[in-house]
Amino acid sequence: MSAYPPRTPQHVPSAYNSHQTPQGQGGGSTGGGFPANNNTPSNFNSPPPGTATATGIPGTAQVPGTQHPDSYFSESRKGEVNELRQLLRNFNIERDAQRKRDIMKKVIAYMTLGIDVSRLFSEMMMAIETRDLVIKKMVYLYMSNYASSNPELAQMCTNTLQKDCGNEDPMVRGLALRALCSLNLPEMVEYIGEPLRKSLTDPHAYVRKTGVMAVLKLYHLDHDCFIKCDFVDIVYDMLRDGDANVVSNCILVLNEIMAVEGGMALNRAIMLHLLNRIHEFSEFGILPVLDLVARYQPANEEEMYQIMNLLDPVLRTNNTAAVLAIVKSFLLLTARPDGTAKPGEAVATDMQISVVQRVKAPLVTMVTGGIPEMVYTLLKHIDALVTLCPGVFDDEYRHFYVRISDPTNVKYLRVPLLAKLVCPSNASDIVAELGEYVTGSDRILSRLAIRALSRIACHDHGGEGCVDAIVG
């Protein structure tokens, strides 16, 4: 048989129907009777226009559901959605598990690209009865996306989703509950309440944290039903949950539900309970807790020091957002009660200066080894801290020199900051460094350097001889 069968046998020249190579045409065979010369008709060199290829063999049509993963998001051919419908109709009798997944992946890929595959809703719902967790995830995703356009068909899957909410596999229970609450159909509210209430007391943490987020979806879907179910008190009680991820989800949900009141209510017991478990939270789960600290007002100075001591170990983390959140919390805790300074008095309190000195080392370390986006954010915060507490960062001025690898936005932020760090002990080094920037090829950087030198000269922070060195 030929390794490269022609698309239409009636167009094949007679010379290629023979198993032997015609004499005088290069002598040799390519394995299927084709001559090894360049006289092959053009029909065999490239596929007809519009024909997709999945295997790299010219003229071979692409079969939905059997293609390479890289081609899932390729442009669809006309009528391929109908071909997928035929494959989905035979889905339950298909024995190849990987082929089943590939069919589903193709449907989800089309949906992601914006191609309307809502016509396949009935066929996709037939595939929901499966033990394959990957396929079940994709069916749930499809159903959540197109339920609003097919509400009647979506309601037909209610029994299946409710049954999956009681599945022995916690992953299935969580996914089914998330899908049930993601349909965004008012008609489904009556079916959500009972599975949702059970999920909040589920023995598995994944189901509980999914249930907490489902509470928020119910709040936006039907506010009256949410009030009747009294989920707010339940979520407050779950702040004592043994899993830190569940607790962080509870904080997020309560803050959004009670946004009109300024966020969830805080007291000493809640605050200290969360801070004593601060080491249990994940890199992202710790951030909602730190946001609460910034809102909390300690009753006395002793409680303030207790909170600061509980947060101090977090400064050793490499999580930039967490460190900046702690800096914010510390500055707010140590600020004046009325938020103002007396006439002639420095804006920062003595305690705030101590706080900035404590957080200086972690911030400088992150600026030295961070990615450009993170460095830019850190420099903005450090600039504000230098303005609040002048002189604290003066001895670390070398870490703020412009680097050749810095993007322009970071370079342009470093130069004005250097001018704020000038003191008699480092003025000569900073002036010499800025002088190098003046003669550089970057005109904007040169202007910023000249402006920085002018600031140093006008404020005369560099000590004796600094102004002469700048002018000279």
Image: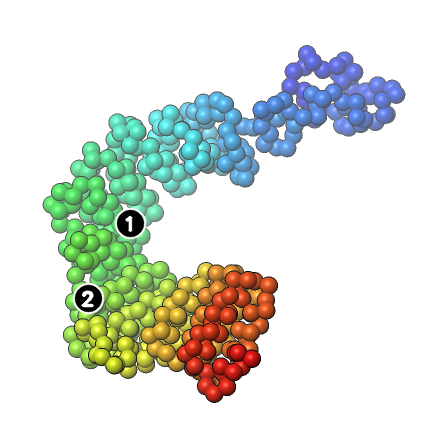
460 above or below 112?
below
In percent of width and height, residue 69 lies at: 53, 39
Position of the C terminus by quadrant: bottom right
Say which residue appears at 32% left-offset and 80% top-offset.
Answer: 353
Q: Residue at x 29, y 61 (%)?
A: 288
Q: Is residue 406 above or below residue 468?
A: above
Q: Is residue 458 left or right of residue 279?
A: right
- Seen from this angle, which residue lies furthest top? 10
- From the viewer's perspective, is the residue at label 2 or at label 1 nearer? 2
Which quadrant would the N terminus be assigned to in this image?
A: top right
Residue 310: image tag: none
Give the answer, above or below, for where 378 lies relative to 246. Answer: below
**Element at badge 2?**
helix
Crowding at dot 2, Cα within 10 Å, few <14 / some 14-19 / many 20+, comes out as few
* Inter-mark Cα distance, 2 to 1: 22 Å
Question: Residue 222: x, y in percent?
Answer: 18, 41
Give the labeled residue for mark 1.
210
Question: What residue is drawn where x is 19% and y is 66%?
Answer: 270
Left/right placement of residue 296 relative to residue 244 reads left
Disc 1 marks a residue whose amino acid type is Thr
| Horizontal and vertical percent position of residue 373 | 46, 60
Indicate whether 217 appears above or below 433: above
Front-lying residue, 461 or 315: 461
- Amino acid under disc 2: Ile
Q: Residue furthest right?
A: 24
Q: Which colouring convention does the figure follow?
A: rainbow
Give the labeled residue for mark 2.
Answer: 270
Look at the numbered disc 1 and give the secondary structure of its residue: helix
Q: Position of residue 450 (x, y in %)?
A: 50, 70
Q: Nearer the viewer, residue 118 or 280?
A: 118
